[in-house]
Amino acid sequence: MGLNLDYINGQTPLDEDEKEGLKIPTITTRGELDEFEQLNIEKAVEWTLKNKFKIGKILTEKFIKDLHKRMFGEVWKWAGEFRNTNKNIGVDKFQIGIELRNLIDDCKYWIENNTFDADEFAVRFSHRVVKVHLFPNGNGRHSRLLGDILVNHGFNKPVFTWGGKDLVHKGEARIEYLKAIREADEGNYNKLIEFARK
Ligand SMILES: Nc1ncnc2c1ncn2[C@@H]1O[C@H](COP(=O)(O)OP(=O)(O)O)[C@@H](O)[C@H]1O
Ligand SMILES: [Mg+2]
């Protein structure tokens, strides 16, 4: 028995070979998959609570990949590895490393020049990461936790609420979130910054 998942607006479908990366063969439904992923993510969150990361460490390819692996590594074989297929969201698969490098360089410039306050910095970073779409799946959840880590560990501010509601499933909150994300795609970050603290 394989996976039979339906995809909601703004979620990236998995390719057949990526589905094969499932480490828990008893998972057959979307609901089961969600639960296993959520348990894995909770362990990753615990890890972030037990540690203190410096901003220079957070803003590295290694940390960004490691975080994804911690969030999804018990469920997916490809966790923490850049995708090698193209998606309806994100840059070409061959541009992922370069785009991430550009983002990290931009972040260093923002720090040196005090370009943004903590919230705007973290939201812009999180959004740019999800816009590149580094991984086969889990990009939204990974980008939001990354934003939380940056604002909390890097700037000593509370983690974001990201609307305070479930964003993984269909619903008002997800619609509002995706609207804000699309505005951010156009360089308009106000809605997403506001949403992140709502
Ligand atoms: N137009 C867009 N521009 C940038 N990011 C987007 C866009 N549309 C959706 N996203 C992001 O992509 C995520 C979906 O990617 P996916 O890898 O399936 O993440 P997850 O599995 O955590 O939901 C959404 O939650 C959102 O954060
Ligand atoms: Mg997804």
Image (cartoon, rainbow, N blue to C red):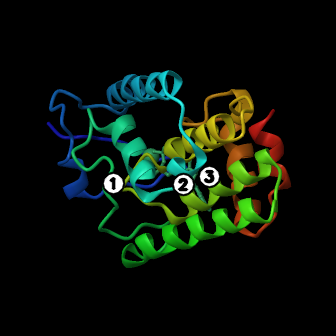
Which residue corresponds to the image point at 56% horizontal and 52% vertical from the top-left? Answer: 56
Q: Which residue is mark 3?
A: 126
Q: Which residue is mark 1?
A: 14
Residue type at the position of mark 3: Ser
Q: Earlier in the sequence, mark 3 or mark 2?
A: 2
Residue type at the position of mark 2: Leu
Residue 117 sits above or below residue 34 on the image = below
Q: In the image, residue 194 lies at what x, y percent?
A: 83, 43
Which residue corresponds to the image point at 79% horizontal and 65% vertical from the top-left? Answer: 113
Residue type at the position of mark 1: Leu
Q: Earlier in the sequence, mark 1 or mark 3?
A: 1
The answer to whether the residues at label 2 and label 1 have Cβ atoms under 8 Å apart is no
Q: Nearer the viewer, mark 3 or mark 2?
A: 2
> Disc 3 versus disc 2: distance between alpha carbons?
11 Å
Image disc number at residue 161:
none
Which residue corresponds to the image point at 24% horizontal and 54% vertical from the top-left? Answer: 18
